[in-house]
Amino acid sequence: MDSASSNAFRSLYAQGTDRLTADAADPFWLAAPPLSVDQSPFGESLRSLATIVRSRWTGQHLYVLFECAFQKLHLRPEPRRDRKTWELWNWDVVELFLGDDWAHIERYKEFELSPQGEWLDVAIDRTPPDLERNRHWSSGFLTEARIDASGRSWNGAMRIPFASITTGPVVAGKIFRANVYRMEGPPEARTFLAWKATGSESFHVPAAFGILELII
């Protein structure tokens, strides 16, 4: 089933593995149903920058792959991959928001990844709004990225420990609140994409989130 036609982003079960690859041709990723992120936060079509997202899961980790066509890369000079990069969102980046507190939807986790493999993880709590409150939170997630300049695309992969996003059992049928975003271009010509339109310039609209579902 193509997740793009559904309110659910579906993550397919995989036998336990510690391997993380950003190779979209790897059978590990090809088995997973694709999700197309191809609209602005206001619902306008942006198919020229369509981003395909796939996910797998094991008992310990959630794996996510982003395949991103690009027009022109806007990259941060002197990238660092050994620590989180604050304000990474000012450069080309993909973002995954995940929440498992259904009574308090304003609490969720944010994961970011750049074409150069830079990363950022933040625990968000918008009661009251304070995006920097948990900036030093650490999820322990891993990233990989690769750029195909001739093909004008880049891929990025994440491996997120379930222990960092839920305290409940990890079983088929479990669902998380989720949204997927992407930003491309310099400040004067920035393009924003969202899986679920927020109707706002802000990505932090948890009421607009869709669902990530674990399947077998």
Image: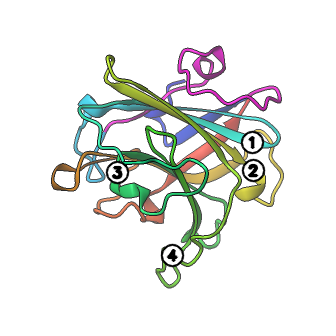
Q: Which numbered tag is attached to residue 91?
A: 3
Q: How many marks?
A: 4
Dot 4, crowdedness within 10 Å: few (<14), some or many (≥20)? Answer: few
Residue 71, which numbered label? none
Classify residue 60 by image quadrant.
Answer: top right
Q: Is residue 23 left or right of residue 198?
A: right
- Disc 2 and disc 3: Cα gap in Å? 27 Å
Farthest residue to the bottom: give it: 128
- Seen in the picture, residue 100 relative to 146 is either above or below; the reply is below
The dot on residue 61 is 1
* Amino acid, disc 1: His
> Can you tell which of label 2 and label 4 is closer to the viewer?
4
The location of residue 143, given as percent across then percent down, is 60, 40
**Residue type highlighted by circle 2:** Phe
For marks 4 and 1, the one nearer the N-term is 1
The residue sitting at 53% across, 82% down in the picture is 127
- Whether the magenta-drawn stretch holds residue 25 is answered as yes
Image position, residue 20 (x, y; %): 67, 30
- Earlier sequence position, callout 2 versus callout 4: 4
- Tell me the amino acid under the disc marked 4: Glu
Determine whether the residue tagged by mark 3 lies in a helix, strand or loop.
Answer: loop
Residue 9 x/y as whole percent: 55, 39
Q: Is residue 167 magenta?
A: no
**Crowding near the residue tagged with mark 2, few <14, some 14–19, many ≥20 C-alpha atoms within 10 Å:** some
Dot 1: what SS? strand
Disc 2: which residue:
162
Task: Name the one closer to the observer, 213 or 167.
Answer: 167
Disc 4 from disc 3: Cα separation:
18 Å
| Marks 4 and 1, how far apart at CA | 26 Å
Q: Nearer the viewer, mark 4 or mark 1?
A: 4
Q: Which residues are magenta?
A: 14-38
